[in-house]
Amino acid sequence: MDRYLQMPELLDECGELAATLLEECERVVIQWDERPLWGTRECWGADRQRILASLEEAEIVREAIANRITLLAIKAELETWFLADRQLIEAYVKGKKGAHQLKNRFRNYRKPETIANPKNTLIGYTTQELGRARRYNDTTHALPLAQNLDLRRAQRVPSFQRFLAKVARTAVHV
């Protein structure tokens, strides 16, 4: 699955992956960043149309798209959600540093969606604290951070609130 995380063609190929997931999963959420890994910044509407075309190309019927697949665009990047939880970031860094103290406390962002580049903000802080070799890397560190994210703090982020609303609607359909 890591090959999908690295490819700019992700939007065009997500239908194939969704079809595979639907064989085992009741519901699938397709989430993408406003600013994806490959650095382009396209219109969310255009991204959504590419995803829908990919789902149809994978022969996923419209009923399944409507009832079993949820689409969600995140403002800026997934890291926006992490920046809402200072304790999460500090615990992540402390876990990698061992007994060493933090050089600086991580800033408490009240409105993380206003940060110009959330991923680079997180990379910068972790580089300062841990060095280049152990700094934040989204393909290896995003999942552990997401698993420990404080949902109450993350709810300060409007795109996270949309995510929760979509998950709640999804749960009703299952």
Image (tube, grey):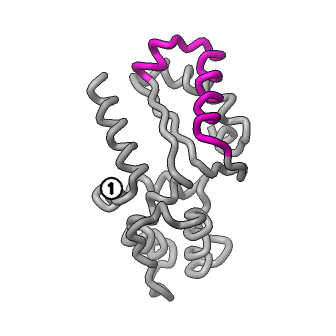
Q: Position of residue 117 (x, y in %)?
A: 60, 64
Q: Is residue 152 above or below residue 14?
A: below
What's the magenta bit mostly, secondary-structure-wise? Answer: helix
Q: Mark 1 = which residue?
A: 155
- Determine the secondary structure under disc 1: loop
Magenta segment boundaries in residue numbering? 42-68
Residue at the image position 45 percent from the left and 30 percent from the top: 70
Residue at the image position 40 percent from the left and 64 percent from the top: 84
Q: Nearer the viewer, residue 98 or 64?
A: 64
Residue at the image position 70 percent from the left and 45 percent from the top: 6
Residue 21: in magenta span = no
Counting every numbered tag in the picture gives: 1
Q: Position of residue 142 (x, y in %)?
A: 52, 55
Locate residue 48: give its quadrant: top right
Describe residue 65's horizontal placement relative to residue 52 as left or right: left
Q: Position of residue 152 (x, y in %)?
A: 28, 58
Q: Nearer the viewer, residue 133 or 31?
A: 31
Q: Is residue 95 above or below residue 168?
A: below
Q: In which quadrant will I find the N terminus?
A: top right
Residue at the image position 67 percent from the left and 71 percent from the top: 133
Locate residue 47: give its quadrant: top right
Badge 1 local density, few (<14 within 10 Å), some, or many (20+)? Answer: some
Q: Nearer the viewer, residue 28 or 169?
A: 169
Q: Is residue 115 above or below residue 146?
A: below
Amino acid at circle 1:
Gln
Q: Position of residue 38 (x, y in %)?
A: 72, 49
Q: In which quadrant will I find the C terminus?
A: top left
